[in-house]
Amino acid sequence: MTNGQTQSNKQIKNKWILDLTIFIGFLIAMDPHSTGIAIHEWLTLSALVTIMIHLLLNWDWIAQVTLRFAGRVSTRSRLNYILNWLLFIDGILIMLSGILISESVVPALGISLPAGFAWRRLHDMSANIALLLLGLHTALHWDWIVNAFKTFIAQPIGRLFVKRDERKDVTA
Amino acid sequence: MKTLGRILIILAVTALVTGALYLIVNAGGTGTASDFTQRGEQFASSSDFEAGARPEFEGGGREPRQLGGGWAFGLLKNMGVISLLVAILVLPKGLAKRKRLAAVKVKADDTV
Ligand code: HEM
């Protein structure tokens, strides 16, 4: 149920870089005490664009599993699909609650929202749930992540050293 | 055109889920802070929040932040949670695969 075979190396590389960016962005978003609220809010809102691209790049998989969900789909894909929906819903809850308790972006737009105690708790809770879901999401895609790392990072670095050794051999 | 259609589908689903979540949470009747502020309590202001204070939560806040080590601790803690989950789910699968391969090798050696 992977669409890996039909994707070019360049597409896989782009996907991998985008996913890594989202992952690092999420880790930064998880610590607003260090970045400050303003950076936290602007960074996470701009990350919405990367999430949209992530969904578009994985559209074929999403469409295939959605159409076949009740029929012939591997348990792994089904599990993955359910987990992705949970992550999507939880992500929306983080953003919605974030906007409703915003102290920087929303006031800057001249809008004032009533302080929401429950939304604050929900923001904190949904962020913690997202951390767990992201861990599961990463685990389910671990082979893909490791393969892409080998292909686009480890092997090119390894080749650099081999080339240098070859050059040494020639000059020796 | 195809991409635009897909973007619209994603936005429509997002709007639906957002609306549903908003209704569900507000139906709980705890969405606003009016009774909480009436008790004279306050949310943490931005600067207090960044220093770790959380008067709106029981206990009033977290450990005071140590300058220099705070961000690294948060990052490491979150990375730790993700690594733990990956290890729990991925390692047993790798070990089982290795065992299976070893069993196949022993079988092949026996037949030689
Ligand atoms: C990926 C998205 C996001 C993640 C993972 C995230 C995560 C977090 C976390 C972990 C906290 C600390 C909660 C605590 O210490 O109890 C927090 C606080 C906060 N976040 Fe976010 N957040 C995200 C998006 C947003 C957005 C889009 C906004 C607003 C536009 C926002 C506004 C805030 C505010 C105002 C606080 C401080 C509120 C308080 O005092 O509890 N967040 N966020």
Image: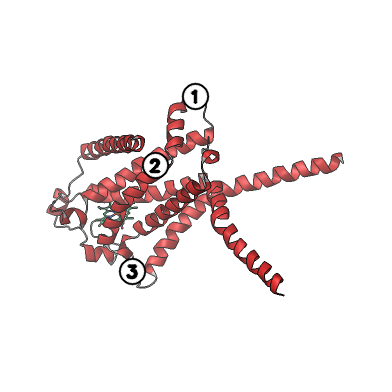
SS category of the residue bearing label 3:
loop
x then y, percent, for residue B80:
47, 58
The answer to whether A77 appears left or right of A163 in the picture is left
Q: Which is more toward the observer, B9 or B22?
A: B9
The answer to whether A136 appears left or right of B27 in the picture is right
Q: Which residue is mark 2?
A: A55
Q: Which residue is mark 3?
A: B65
Front disc: 3 or 2: 2
Give the amino acid type for the residue marked by disc 3 in the picture. Arg
Q: Residue at x 26, y 47 (%)?
A: A97
User: Which mark is drawn over residue A127?
Assistant: none
Give a yes or no on whether discs 1 and 3 share a subunit. Answer: no
Q: Is mark 3 within 8 Å of ligand 1?
A: no
Q: Residue at x 37, y 68 (%)?
A: B70
x then y, percent, for residue A161:
62, 66
Q: Which is more toward the observer, B59 or A46?
A: A46
x then y, percent, for residue A96:
26, 45
Q: Disc 1 vs disc 2: Cβ atoms closer than 8 Å?
A: no
Front disc: 1 or 2: 2
Alpha-carbon span between mark 3 and mark 2: 37 Å
Give the amino acid type for the residue marked by disc 1 in the picture. Gly
Is any atom of residue A122 visible in this view?
no
x then y, percent, for residue A99:
23, 49
Q: How many marks?
A: 3
Give the amino acid type for the residue marked by disc 2 in the picture. Leu
Q: Residues within 10 Å of mark 3 (few under 14, many from 20)?
A: some
Q: Residue furthest top?
A: A71
Q: Which residue is mark 1?
A: A71
Q: Residue furthest front?
A: A171
Q: Which image quarter is the C terminus of chain A in?
A: bottom right
Alpha-carbon span between mark 1 and mark 3: 52 Å
